[in-house]
Amino acid sequence: MNVDKLMNELEKKHTGEVEYLQAVREVLESIADVYNENPQFESAGIIERLIEPDRIVTFKVPWADDSGQVHVNLGYRVQFNNAIGPYKGGLRFHPSVNLSSLKFLGFEQIFKNALTTLPMGGGKGGSDFNPKGKSDSEIMRFCQSFMTELWSLIGPETDVPAGDIGVGAKEIGYLYGMYKKLAKENTGVFTGKGLNWGGSLIRPEATGFGNVYFAKEMLATKNESFEGKTVAISGFGNVAWGAAQKATDLGAKVVAISGPDGYIYDPEGISGEKIDFMLELRATNEDIVKPFSYEFDSAQFYEGKKPWDLKVDIALPCAIQNELDKEDAEKLISNGCMCISEGANMPCTPEAIDVIQNSDVLYGPGKAANAGGVATSGLEMTQNSMKLSWNREEVDQRLHKIMIDIHNACVENGKDEDGKVDYVKGANIAGFLKVANAMLDHGVI
Ligand code: NDP
Ligand code: 2IT
């Protein structure tokens, strides 16, 4: 494999799809040696087949707002690869959604899902619909219209969507309701479902919990732990909330969370009722953290700033892609940060990753560190198939074990001669080998 040649060809075919090209380049660069040592991959065209999605479906989503005005958004489902199981991956509703962002997310999802050890392929979907400021009935009508197109493409053994940015339990409820009506069946076709209609305990907090479990394993390689450490988290959504909870449980002090409007610094720590308040803020659908500073005296709001200029021991980016750049990485490192673990998908830019990997800072890439969310989706699918529910402890123990196993797979595949672990390389190689070998077994399809 010649990475530059492949990337040149891909750039010509998909000009301007910046995030997708970024995600593909990262994977190709880290698997090139393993690929070239195994000529059976080259002759079977594995990489050419893996970097293009199996199919992309695009559709229009017309919906009426509360005043009767009709709007039209774009809907997508990218079914990337199903070598090891049904397509699996979230739906994102956010104005930034386009083909490039969904293709990058679907591509990442292939390797992430392979790392979970569970039988799930990779996919992603969503819309440029912005749920911010919309009423519940507007969100319901949008979800129903979206589903009238999506329902025929998905199924419990075909393609199983879930949530992502802008798609939480409420949206999953409306989407699932419409699916059930159209398909005339009540199966586990979504994950992240409500607890009394097939959902799994721990799924809402699983990505954040899993990220902290992964970071805990990385820290342990340096005889460190969360106990007594300060933590900065970006975002205040689903993932950030779970990460704040678990980091606090493990004895750390979460001193920052953020929204698109700026960040909150609270030197007394964001725990207990303050974590509950994060959920209340999210439920307002406004997506701003500023009100946190009105509610708690110890909290200060820094408008338009990112939390990466703070002196913290651990940074957990949990908001969106490319939110932590080279300057942010340099600031974190010069302030003594020892660990950066990605709750979001691809939150660090390639330049930031270079800086981090040339330092002693532990770096957990999203496809390994945030795999706890989809892993728990896999556990939800298992419970649905068995038509039973596990209790909190059972799900949490399984999630914890999966995160330890993912960490071990990264170490096994990413340890350099000097003993340093390159978690990016480890995660990419471990995920790739599983999928590539399955593709070889299935022939050219
Ligand atoms: P949520 O919608 O619950 O929360 C994300 C919030 O972050 C949004 O409200 C968004 O606000 C806000 N945000 C966007 N950009 C920024 C920014 N630059 N700084 C601070 N906040 C910002 O989404 P999730 O918590 O589910 O997802 C967060 C990240 O985690 C995403 O990258 C997602 O792909 C990833 N992830 C999610 C998983 C899951 O199970 N939910 C699993 C694995 C990864 P606004 O709308 O105003 O932009
Ligand atoms: O990025 C992700 O892994 C998710 N949004 C969760 C996907 C899932 O199917 O649970």
Image (tube, rainbow, N blue to C red):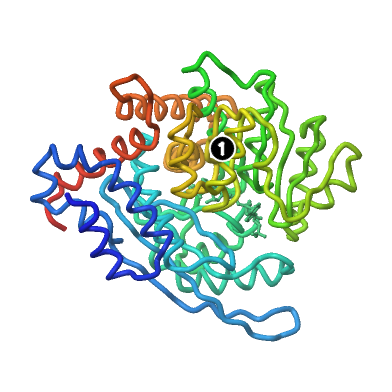
Expressed as whole percent of the image width and height from the top left, the position of residue 420 reads 38, 23
Q: Nearer the viewer, residue 196 or 296?
A: 296
Q: At which x and y percent is residue 425?
A: 33, 36
Residue 387 in view of the camera:
no
Considering only vertical position in the picture, is 152 above or below 192?
A: below
* Residue 321 placement (x, y as % from top left): 52, 53
Relative image position of residue 8 (x, y in whole percent):
25, 63
Is the CB–ligand 1 distance for label 1 below 8 Å? yes
Left or right: residue 67 compared with residue 176: right
The one of 1 and 147 positioned closer to us in this rendering? 1
Please tell me whether residue 433 is drawn above or below residue 214 in the rendered image.
below
Q: Is residue 127 left or right of residue 173?
A: left
Looking at the image, is 276 positioned above or below residue 171? Answer: above
Mark 1 neighbour density, 10 Å: few (under 14) some (14–19) many (20 or more): many
Whether residue 331 is visible to the viewer of this picture, yes or no, is yes
The three-letter amino acid code for the residue at tag 1 is Ala
Q: Secondary structure at mark 1?
A: helix
Based on the displayed image, in which of its 4 quarters is residue 246 positioned?
A: top right
Residue at horizontal 49%, vertical 79%?
A: 60
Residue at screen point 73% across, 56% down? 304
Q: Say which residue appears at 76% left-offset and 38% top-offset.
A: 275
The correct choice, above or below, for 260 with respect to 152 in the image is: above
Position of the C terminus by quadrant:
bottom left
Tell me which corner region of the image, top left, top right, bottom left or bottom right, holds residue 16. Answer: bottom left
**33 or 76: nearer the eye?**
33
Residue that numbered label 1 is attached to: 206
Is 296 left, or right, of 390 in this rendering? right
Looking at the image, which residue is at 77% across and 51% down?
A: 289
Camera-side residue of 351 and 103: 351
Residue at the extreme bottom: 69
